[in-house]
Image (cartoon, grey):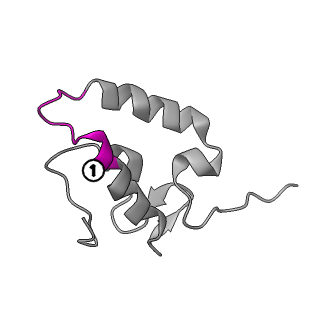
Amino acid sequence: MKSERICRRCLLFESGRTDVLEEIRRHIEKIPSSDRIDDSVYQDRLTTCSTCDQLADGTCLRCGCYPEFRAAFRKQTCPAKEW
């Protein structure tokens, strides 16, 4: 039986979980522009998440969220207070 490797410090797009990532992208597109963060801030947030020791296999271990989704919201914050 093949063992699943957990990708430490990988966001979804790096972990190969494209099915989940595509679903998240569809949900992000539905966020009203007034509630969505701009792309440069979004990328900065994801860069921060990718270096966090609480990230494993595309999931935040502090709160259980997918950072790609949480980071898209203007009013959301990092559970570790990194952004």
Q: State which quadrant residue 44 falls in.
A: bottom left
Q: Nearer the viewer, residue 71 or 6?
A: 71
Secondary structure that dominates the magenta span: loop
Q: Which residues are magenta?
A: 31-42
The answer, for residue 66, to whether it is visible in the render is no
Instruction: Please tell me whether residue 33 is drawn above or below residue 55 in the rendered image.
Output: above
Name which residue lies at 17% across and 27% down: 32
Name which residue lies at 24% across and 40% down: 38
The answer, for residue 26, to whether it is visible in the render is yes
Quadrant of the image for the N terminus? bottom right
- Image location (x, y in percent) of residue 16: 65, 44
Instruction: Please tell me whether residue 9 is drawn above or below residue 38 in the rendered image.
Output: below
Q: Secondary structure at mark 1?
A: helix
Q: Does 44 sit left or right of 7 as displayed?
A: left
Name which residue lies at 27% across and 50% down: 41
- Image location (x, y in percent) of residue 53: 47, 75
Q: Does 8 sit left or right of 43 as displayed?
A: right
- Image location (x, y in percent) of residue 6: 65, 62
- Image location (x, y in percent) of residue 25: 42, 31
State yes or no: residue 26 in magenta.
Answer: no
In the rendered image, the residue lying farthest to the bottom is 53
Residue placed under numbered mark 1 in the picture: 41
